[in-house]
Image: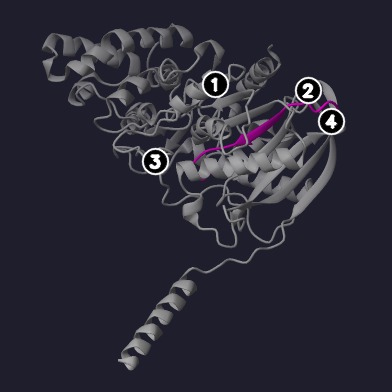
Amino acid sequence: MKEIICIMLLCALQVTAQKEKKEEIKPIPKAKSFVTSHQGVFGGKTINYKATAKETFLTNKMGDSIATFWSVAYTKTPMGDVGKRPVTFVFNGGPGSASMWLHMGFFGPKVVQVDSDAIKDDGAAPYDLVKNEHGLLDLTDLVFIDPVGTGYSRLVGKGKGKDFYGLKEDVDSFAQFIRKWVTENQRWFSPKYLAGESYGTTRAAYLGKALEGSGQNMALNGMILISQALDYAGSTSIHHNMTSYITYLPSMAATAWYHKKAGQGKTLEDFVAECRKFTYERYSPALYKGNLLADSEKEAIADKLSYFTGLDKTYILNSNLRILMGRFQKKLLEDKGLAVGRLDGRFMGDEVDKVAERPHLGDPASYQISAAYTAALNHYFASELNVKMDRPYITSGGGSGWRWRTVPDGQYWEPMPVNTAPHLGETMRRNPAMKVMVASGYYDLITPFFDAEYTFARNGIATSRVEMTYYEAGHMMYTHQPDLIKLAKDIRTFLTAQ
């Protein structure tokens, strides 16, 4: 009997040892920090500022270090009155994208230039890195944040991917970082803003609510939501998602107008307004009638859809009046053998398979500029911020196996799409001082501008404190130089409005 017990104990110890071996604890390195001093002209004013590129440890409830967040902060020197100097926390989306795009494309002291007219590919190095005379450092300090798995941010110690790769987990990690940064830099009295792009807006809407909790209530002054994606029903073009057929149509019309396939003789704004009216008053009811729609009415709707999208009426009828975005990307310029971009419908890609249902080479609006952005950031870090790290800067990919489902009250997203807009609505009503700016590109075919209007008209959002702005480009409207200038001007107005 004793022998059996000993064997059982031995087996248990072996199992425990194997588990401990599997749960490898990553070493905790010393956090790195690189501080440099600079001067630049922003908004016509000469500003002295400090750049702090560093790692910040995040901890679990037991106080164990589980990750480092990489951030780059630009702070004015001397700062002056801390209560009058705002700080804006900036991040991109994905999920699993570094802040490189907003850093090197719009908000940073220097930005990379790509073809403003979306015609030429970025090609190979060298690229043009220029002073950002439209930057905002005269108005606000800026902190660029990279989530775990992107940039130089990574797991350490007992940290695991499941601690970060999920909607709530991601928000909690950002809330912890922001509180740490504000505390370490003595900025609790500073006006605070969030600036997110794409999934970064999903995060921002939830993050505003999270910052109010955990026994450290932090109220925000505002949010800048670039290419918002709060309610995924309106930005997910798939079969049987009725909302998406509605929200994407005006963006298809705008893109067809741009490529001279529809709306000729009218201004973009007038053509879009016409499509909005049709979508609300005729297209939506027709979709909801389904097979109850009379043949004559179906023909009339198909005629109008062809008028707005530039697609063949027979194709639209065969699609049962429902046009998926991937198909639109291939069909619009099918006569030229080109596919239009998803992030920005101005871009065009020459694909090998001319008759595929959707683009198969990837998104030309992404692959035609990403090399320039990646090269610019690495060059800028090394040559101007003196950053020396022992690993590569990861621009995207962090967050495999992302979990969308967990929310604080234990309910689940599925089968409903993700929607953080109600969080924003609640936060705005608890905090009547908070305002929101929503920036949308007409040619954004992934987070359509009409979805922004549809989302913000619902969900309990205080629309009197929401500013909607529009640009003649796509998801990253700042790649279009006139829109970069307009976006900067609009944000300046937003930050300085009383």
Crowd class of label 1 (few under 14; some 14 to 19; many from 20; radius 10 Å): few
Q: Earlier in the sequence, mark 1 or mark 3?
A: 3
Mark 1–mark 4 Cα distance, whole angstroms, equals: 30 Å
The residue type indicated by label 4 comes to: Met
Above-or-below relation of 387 to 362:
below
Q: Which residues are magenta?
A: 80-97
Disc 2 versus disc 1: nearer the observer:
1
Between marks 4 and 3, how big is the CA–CA gap? 52 Å
Q: Which residue is mark 3?
A: 351
N-terminal of the two: label 2 or label 1?
A: 2
Quadrant of the image containing the C terminus: top right
Q: Residue at x 42, y 81 (%)?
A: 14
Helix, strand, or loop for circle 3? Answer: loop
Q: Residues within 10 Å of mark 2 (few under 14, many from 20)?
A: few
Say whether residue 90 is magenta: yes
Kindly identify which residue carries mark 2: 84
Q: Secondary structure at mark 1?
A: helix
Task: Name which quarter of the figure residue 174 lies in.
Answer: top right
Q: Nearer the viewer, residue 340 or 52?
A: 52
Name the image colouring. Answer: one colour
- As shown in the figure, which amino acid type bears the numbered disc 3? Glu
**Residue tagged 1:** 430
Q: Residue 19 location in percent, x, y? A: 44, 72
Look at the numbered disc 4 and give the secondary structure of its residue: loop
Residue beneath disc 4? 79
Residue 50's place in the image compared with 378, above or below, is above
Q: CA distance from mark 2 to mark 1?
A: 23 Å
